[in-house]
Image (cartoon, rainbow, N blue to C red):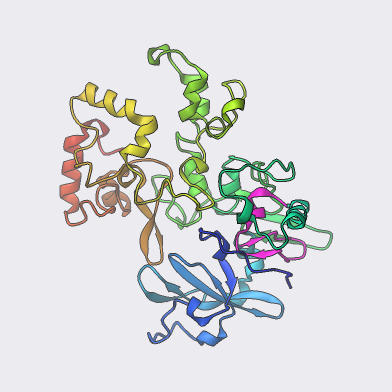
Amino acid sequence: MSSAIEPDTLPTLHPVMFRPVTDLTDIQGDFNLKTAAVTFKKEDIEFIIGNKWEQVYARMIDNEYYPLPAKWLITTQKWVPYKADNWRETPLSTNCNGCHTTGFNPDTYEFSEYGIGCEACHGPAGKHVIQQRQIQPGSVCRVCHTGKEASADKEIIVSVNNSVCGQCHSRGQQSNKSEHMQTSFNFPVKYKPGNSLPTDYLMSSKQNDHKGKNWWAVGLSKNRHQEFADFSVSTHSKSLKHLKEKYTEIRGELTDQCLECHSSDYKFSKDDAKLTLATAKYGISCVVCHEPHGLRRQFNSQNIDAEHCGLCHVDSFSNKAAETGKAHYPCPPSAASCADCHMPYIIKSGGAYPIRSHAFKIVPPIASETFKMPNSCQNGGCHADKSLDWAKEAFAKHYPEYSGNE
């Protein structure tokens, strides 16, 4: 069905999101753990999806990829049923492959690579690859691209547009109409890196989530693959717009240097060709905090702290403290990071809550009582040993101005 090739292994999980089984040790599921959910053998598994929080297993049947009816939760080391009643009605080509493969063609269901390869984010680059292999036969992308050199090849798309990440870090549906039929896909189709997502891609939102599966009542994501939707409503994503429309003279003169914190394309432009307030296009985007190639991990869930966030927010810290006469937060700096409060773990995967919110909103303890959701004070490991009543009282004491809201 596909002319797919195995991806070259880069220091990031993207290439191994969907791959053929080459060694049974790639399968993390414990088949010695007896459960009625597992109705297949390890030897039946031909493909693996996932590698961090959980693994879904698949095989090809009648020229189509199908998930097997149980998945392994890496986080909690458990088996759970997975589409057990309708797995033969859940082909990966319309449900998963647009995000777990590279070069997916919605007309033929074929793709060029297993996993997320370079072209998923940088666009088709056949001429570029041929040219480079003529120069250095057998070379792969990482031989030349160490993270420092920028390609001069105009065929290669290099964009800080959030939609590059949002094409997969979002949840929604899009139809692909052909001469004979219309098919619905659970991902954007025919997306070109650098552009915005297709206008006919219907992204999941609190308004259309009628069963409450994907969104908490406060409007934050509760399901995976929704970082783009969360981030899109955050003030970070609107940082350039707010700078231009809401800047006041009380902060001093508005200059191009303000873009260092308010614009991702300014931040990544070369020193001899810096953008200006008139030419910058994007606010803070995903790549400011996430190095997508994994070549340098400047931010991850363990090291997002005041030192990193303070590069742009140091004035906010000091001004707030001066106005209120108290510290920005009551916990010792060594006990909590900025992310623990502003990016709480409220998204479940692998049977636990290991994924942070990307809306940058505090979830007060009262939300746990009202909406049965995790809160900023207790689910990051800080005060999990305390009662909810204690957390509510402590939050109200230190932040009385919020009256239970973020």
Mainly helix, strand or loop, the magenta region? loop
Residue at 47% over, 20% down: 246
Q: Nearer the viewer, residue 406 or 254?
A: 254
Report whether 351 appears left or right of 378.
right
Picture quadrant of residue 142: bottom right
Q: Nearer the viewer, residue 329 or 199?
A: 329
Q: Nearer the viewer, residue 344 or 275?
A: 275
Q: The C terminus appears in which quarter of the rendering?
A: top left
Q: The N terminus appears in which quarter of the rendering?
A: bottom right
Q: Is residue 79 visible?
A: yes
Eyeballing the image, is 32 above or below 364?
below
Residue at 64% over, 71% down: 91
Eyeballing the image, is 11 above or below 235?
below
Eyeballing the image, is 111 above or below 241?
below
Q: Which residues are magenta?
A: 101-124
Eyeballing the image, is 229 above or below 98?
above
Q: Is residue 40 visible?
A: no
Residue at 58% over, 54% down: 168
Residue 113 among those drawn in magenta: yes
Picture quadrant of residue 102: bottom right
